[in-house]
Image (cartoon, rainbow, N blue to C red):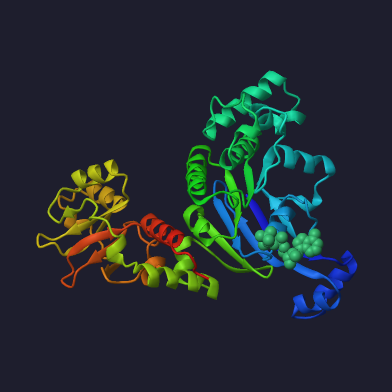
Amino acid sequence: MIDVRGLTKVFGLPDGRARRALDTGADRASAVRAAGGVLAVNDVSFSVEPGELFVIMGLSGSGKSTVIRMINRLVEPTAGTVSYDGVDVGGMSAEQLRELRNKRVSMVFQHFALFPHRTVRENAAYGLKTRGMSKRERLDRADVALEQVGLADRGDAYPSEFSGGMRQRVGLARALATDPDVLIMDEPFSALDPLIRRAMQEQLLQLQQELGKTILFVTHDLNEAMRIGDRIMVMKDGEVIQLGTGPDIIGNPANDYVQDFVSDVDRTRGLTAGSVMQSPWFTATADEEPASVLARMRKARGDGVYVIETDGTILGVATGEQLTLAIRDGASHVRDCVVDDYTAVSDETPIAEFCHLTGGHVVPLAVVDSDKHLIGVVPRAHVLEAIATATEEVPEHA
Ligand SMILES: Nc1ncnc2c1ncn2[C@@H]1O[C@H](COP(=O)(O)OP(=O)(O)OP(=O)(O)O)[C@@H](O)[C@H]1O
C-alpha cells in the first residue's frame, strides 16, 4: 500500500549542498553536520501492507515525525521515494497531491486543533468541506464517524465541554469522516493520562478491526507500540534500528533501549511463562475422531490443537489443515495427523527468553512440567499484554 525507499531528509541546507554532503562519504551524518545541516532521516525504507497497523517508534528527535511528513509530502524529501499503490508521490501534480491529502490520507496529531466556536459535529465534518457535498450530507457523515469513536449523541456539544480524551476522539472522528484508506497518527494519545490512553488504544484496535484502515502510528512509547502494532519500526538518530513484530523485537532486541526495557520488565516483575500462562486450551486425545476435533477447533476459532496422551504428555499438534486432509483420506484417529513441530517451555522460563517464539506457531506456546505434561499455554497476545501492563506499573525502565 505504502512503499518507502531510501527516504532521507537534511534540514538546514539548500538541496544541492545537502545532496553533495550526502554523497561525500560513508558517514553521512558527520558530512551533513560539517556542512552545517541536520540529517533528520537517513536512508529509511519500509512498506506498509493494506489494513496493517504499522508503528514507528523512537525517542524524541529520532526522525519519526519527519518520516511521516514526507509520506504525504508535507516535508519534501532530500532523497528517496514514497509511493501509494505503486504511484510515486514525488511525481504527483499539485492537484493529485491535494486529492491524496483530502481523500486518501488523513492525519491525527497529538494536539488536535478543534474550532472552539463550532459544535463537535461541525468539527468532525470539517475535513469534508472541499468535497462538494451538501451540508446535510457532511453532518450525517460526521455523525457516523462520531458514533464510530464512541461519541454518538454528543455532536451538539462544544469542544470546551470535552475532556482531553474526548477531544482526541473528535480529532479521530474528523479523520474518519473523510473515509480515508490511510490514517497517519502522530503521537495521538501522548498527552492523555494512562487510563484514558489505554481506552483509546483499545478503541483504535477495535476500529481497525471493523474498518480495516491502513494505519501509520507514531509513538515514543514502546509499551504503546507493543500493545497496538502489527509491526513496529524502531528508529534512532534518523535510522531504522529494527523492524518486526512485537515478539520479534522483544525476543531479539537490536538496541539497548529495547533490551533494557525487556530485561527490566522481567527483573522487576518476575514475568515467567508460569506467570502469564492460561489453562490449556481445549486439547484432543490421540484416539479421537478428526471430524469432532475439527468441529471443536472451529467453534473455539483455533488454528490448531495440542494432542495429548492419556497420561497428559504432549504427543504433538494437529492443525486444521492436517485434520481436514485426514478426514478426506478417511483417517479415523487424530493420531494419524499429528505433527511434533511445536515449542514448549517450562513455567520458570523468563518472558525475554521465549517471547520471540510466541508468534511462530499456529498453537500458543506450550508450558510443560519436567515430565512433559502440558500445564498451560501462552498465547502471543497474552505475552504482549502482560509486558505492557507490567511496564505501566514500573515507574522507570530507562
Ligand atoms: N524544520 C526543521 N528544521 C531543522 N531541523 C529539524 C526540523 N524538523 C526536525 N528537525 C530535526 O530533525 C530531527 C528529527 O526530528 P523529528 O521531529 O522528525 O523527530 P521525532 O522523532 O518526531 O521527535 P519528536 O518526538 O520530538 O517529535 C531532530 O534532530 C530535529 O531537531
Position of residue 46 relative to residue 139, above or below, is below
Write the residue at 76% across / 69% down: 39
Q: How many marks?
A: 0
Camera sees residue 352: no
Position of residue 117 relative to residue 327, above or below, is above
Closer-to-camera residue (51/385) = 385
Closer-to-camera residue (264/370) = 264
Q: Position of residue 73 (x, y in %)?
A: 77, 51
Camera sees residue 240: yes
Residue 73 shown left or right of residue 348 in the figure: right
Q: Residue furthest left?
A: 310
Q: Position of residue 327 (x, y in %)?
A: 23, 47
Q: Residue furthest front?
A: 161
In terms of image quarters, where does ligand 1 lie?
bottom right
Q: Quadrant of residue 126?
A: top right
Residue 54 shown left or right of residue 314 in the figure: right
Q: Position of residue 234 (x, y in %)?
A: 58, 65
Q: Quadrant of residue 26?
A: bottom right
Position of residue 50 relative to residue 6, above or below, is above
Closer-to-camera residue (187/28) = 187
Q: Position of residue 128 (x, y in %)?
A: 71, 30
Write the residue at 57% across / 38% down: 166
Write the residue at 23% across / 44% down: 296
